[in-house]
Image: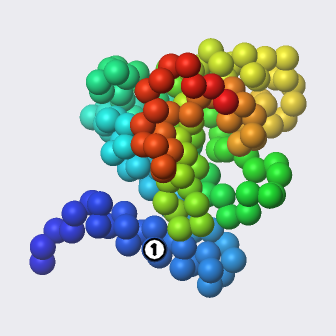
Amino acid sequence: MALYAVDKLMSEARRLAAEYRKATGKPLAISNEIALFDAARLLNLEVPEDGGAGYDLVGRGRREGRRIQVKARALFDEGKSGQRIGQLKLDREWDSVMLVLMDENYEPSEIHEADRSEILAALKGRENAPRNRRGAMSVARFKHISRLVWTQEEGEITDELWQN
């Protein structure tokens, strides 16, 4: 039996996740694996050999050596408020967090990146709120403090002047 190419497997995983949601009304817990694959492929990142200790990917090129956590969110109803990203590993070593936003077909639509200092500043003063103690943040808040680094229409955005 021949091995499948990872990009073909991810394409099939997207299709299955979308079909599962249509059939059950519930998301299939696969979005983070798809987001890791997309961020690495689209932004010249690699999976660390040691599996990372608090980060998912390591930068190459203009992000050389940066340790990056990756979070994913599939947006099925953009009008729905209060959508949150997964827990941030605040007690671990990392340099930035990328949020991969996906459409209803689990295709990437935008990727946002925020540096550690920006995230810690956004959480400062809110440490006693239960969600903030766990390193949780809304998608809207993350988008507000981050910079847009990739879109489906434009590809990678390298203009450092771009801000949300």
The foreground one among 53 and 79 is 79
Please report the residue visible at 78 percent of the width from the left and 17 percent of the height from the top. 124
Which amino acid, mark 1? Arg
In the displayed structure image, the side of residue 126 where residue 139 appears, left or right? left
Please report the residue visible at 75 percent of the width from the left and 40 percent of the height from the top. 140
Quick one: quadrant of the C terminus? top right
Where does residue 90 sit, x and y in percent of width and height? 62, 25
Please report the residue visible at 63 percent of the width from the left and 25 percent of the height from the top. 163
Where does residue 79 sit, x and y in percent of width and height? 80, 58
Where is 153 relative to 97, above or below? below
Where is 138 relative to 33, above or below? above
Quick one: quadrant of the N terminus? bottom left
Q: Residue furthest bottom?
A: 23
The quarter of the displayed image where residue 66 is located:
top left
Q: Which residue is mark 1?
A: 15
Disc 1, SS: helix
Please report the residue visible at 30 percent of the width from the left and 27 percent of the height from the top. 60
In the displayed structure image, the side of residue 2 where residue 82 appears, left or right? right
Badge 1: few (under 14), some or many (20 or more) residues near its Cα, within 10 Å?
Answer: some
